[in-house]
Image (cartoon, rainbow, N blue to C red):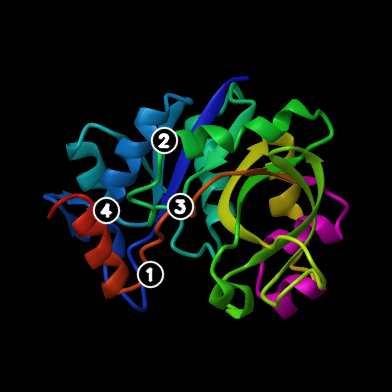
């Protein structure tokens, strides 16, 4: 399948101003993400942004960027607009949405996001990792994926929640917010209105489940570091030896 990797990156950030441009060992964070995506060798890479400053930084580093609206409320809406602009002939069959705040993500983790498409009925593919830390089981900031095993390293997602679920003995899974879409699935998803459970849990992926779309998740070993605030940025810099 022809794959397009889209990296949504907006300039506004409440907890970390101009987060996408934060310096990590001499390069902006969004460029570090693009570099990790390039190492995955999974397809063409384009940064989708609402900022001329980000576009210039990305292109100066040798990567492709496209301008998108400042009005988008979600990364999925932003990558959908970018898809129409950079692939008007609909040559890409699958799209990977790699968040622009994952500067240390392993390239193989990005590749793993495509694995669930081995199942033709899968509309959206994502990732999960088994929770080992008891604190994470009860932390509402750690989104849990509730799913049925459909292989040694794969789950069919039934629900996503900030609560501790499912109840009883057995593993809990930390949902990793990296998605791959079949092109037609992304088109359908962005056409749907926000759903009841999506609003309640504040989890966009529930919109897909509530509308009968299938999400499968590949199980990976570790959760990539997401840079949300200054402490996370400091950790990312340490990883790069800065």
Which mark is in front, 1 or 2?
2
Question: Going by the image, does 15 lie left or right of 211?
Answer: left
In this orientation, which residue lies closer to the viewer: 218 or 9? 218
Q: Which mark is residue 99?
A: 3
Q: Which residue is mark 1?
A: 228
Q: Of helix, strand and loop, which one carries label 2?
A: helix
Name the outermost residue toward the front.
169
Ranked by sequence position, the earlier of labels 1 and 4 is 4
Image-quadrant location for residue 195:
bottom right
Circles 4 and 3: CB atoms closer than 8 Å: no
Q: Of helix, strand and loop, which one carries label 3?
A: loop
Which mark is in front, 4 or 2?
2
Q: Which mark is residue 29?
A: 4
Ranked by sequence position, the earlier of labels 4 and 2 is 4
- Asked if residue 165 is positioned above or below residue 171 in the image, the reply reads below
Q: Of helix, strand and loop, which one carries label 4?
A: helix
Magenta run includes residue 66 = no
Q: Position of residue 130 (x, y in %)?
A: 62, 56
Q: Give the distance between the C-alpha atoms of the residues marked 1 and 3, in whole angstroms.
A: 12 Å
Q: Which residue is mark 2?
A: 107
- Circle 3: is it few (<14), some (14-19), or many (20+) Cα within 10 Å? many
Residue 141 visible: no
- Circle 2: is it few (<14), some (14-19), or many (20+) Cα within 10 Å? some
Q: Give the distance between the C-alpha atoms of the residues marked 1 and 2, in whole angstroms.
A: 21 Å
In this orientation, which residue lies closer to the viewer: 19 or 220? 220
Q: Position of residue 140 (x, y in %)?
A: 60, 79
Q: Of helix, strand and loop, which one carries label 1?
A: loop
Q: Give the distance between the C-alpha atoms of the residues marked 1 and 4, in whole angstroms.
A: 12 Å
The magenta stretch spans which residues?
A: 196-215
Circles 4 and 2: CB atoms closer than 8 Å: no
Q: Position of residue 94 (x, y in %)?
A: 62, 31
- Circle 4: is it few (<14), some (14-19), or many (20+) Cα within 10 Å? many
């Amino acid at each position: 399948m022809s794959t397009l990797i889209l990296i949504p990156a907006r300039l506004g950030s409440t907890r970390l101003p101009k987060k996408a441009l934060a310096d990590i060992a001499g390069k902006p964070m969004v460029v570090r993400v693009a570099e990790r995506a390039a190492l995955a060798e999974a397809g063409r890479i384009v940064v989708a942004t609402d900022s001329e400053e980000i576009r210039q930084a990305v292109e100066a580093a040798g990567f492709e960027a496209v301008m998108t609206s400042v009005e988008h409320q979600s990364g999925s809406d932003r990558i959908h607009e970018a898809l129409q602009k950079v692939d008007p002939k609909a040559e890409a069959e699958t799209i990977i949405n790699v968040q622009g705040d994952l500067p240390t993500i392993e390239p193989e983790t990005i590749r793993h996001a495509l694995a669930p498409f081995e199942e033709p009925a899968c509309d959206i593919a994502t990732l999960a990792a088994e929770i080992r830390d008891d604190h994470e089981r009860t932390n509402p900031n750690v989104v849990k994926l509730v799913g049925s095993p459909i292989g040694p390293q794969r789950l069919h997602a039934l629900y996503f929640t900030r609560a501790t679920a499912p109840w009883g003995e057995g593993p809990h899974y930390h949902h990793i917010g990296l998605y791959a879409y079949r092109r037609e699935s992304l088109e359908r998803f962005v056409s749907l209105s926000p759903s009841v459970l999506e609003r309640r849990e504040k989890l966009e992926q529930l919109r897909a489940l509530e509308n009968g779309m299938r999400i499968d998740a590949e199980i990976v070993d570790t959760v990539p570091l997401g840079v949300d605030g200054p402490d996370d940025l400091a950790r990312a810099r340490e990883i790069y030896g800065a």
